Amino acid sequence: MVNSLGFLGQKVNVVIDRPLGSKHPQHGFIYEVNYGYIPNTKSPDGEEQDVYVLGIDKPSDKIIGVCIAVIHRTNDNDDKLVVTPNGEDFSDEEIEKLVEFQEKYFKHVILRKLL
């Protein structure tokens, strides 16, 4: 099992299984950013580590990027990484706005690497 905070500042390979504009298979909402996972990892929910990919404005199928933040859900056992192609920074407010389509259903905090 992985500690999602260990990904902060790290370069990661992301497989995007829910590209920008696709529909969630069960809940029906539309993905407003590319969303995927890091292969060969295991997060606390038993699945591979989930990732929001920011900074790409077209659907993609994979990316190598840098983890700039972790969205830690306080009422669910499923942290999400925030990855950008070259480690581009987004403010907490920008992240909140971009992932609100899904995170509005969960209590969470955005965690970052201490400088």
Image (spheres, grey):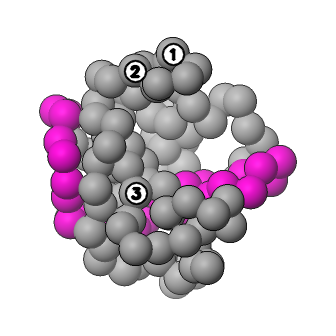
Marks 2/3 in contact by CB < 8 Å: the verdict is no
Q: Where is residue 88 drawn, in percent x and y? A: 28, 60
Q: Where is residue 54 drawn, in percent x and y? A: 33, 46
- The label on residue 37 is 3
Marks 2/1 in contact by CB < 8 Å: the verdict is yes
Q: Mark 2 or 1 closer to N-term?
A: 2
Residue tagged by mark 1?
Answer: 28
89 with respect to 103 (left or right): left
Question: What residue appears at the point 63 percent right and 63 percent down from the top-left corner?
Answer: 46
Res. 90 in view: no
Residue tagged by mark 2?
Answer: 23
How far is disc 2 from disc 3 in space, using C-alphas?
17 Å
Give 95 or 45, whichever is nearer the viewer. Answer: 45
The crowd level at tag 1 (other Cα within 10 Å; few <14, some 14-19, many 20+) is few
Q: Helix or strand or loop: what does disc 2 sit on?
A: loop
**Which quadrant does the N terminus fall into?**
bottom right
Examine the image and state in which quarter residue 86 appears: bottom left
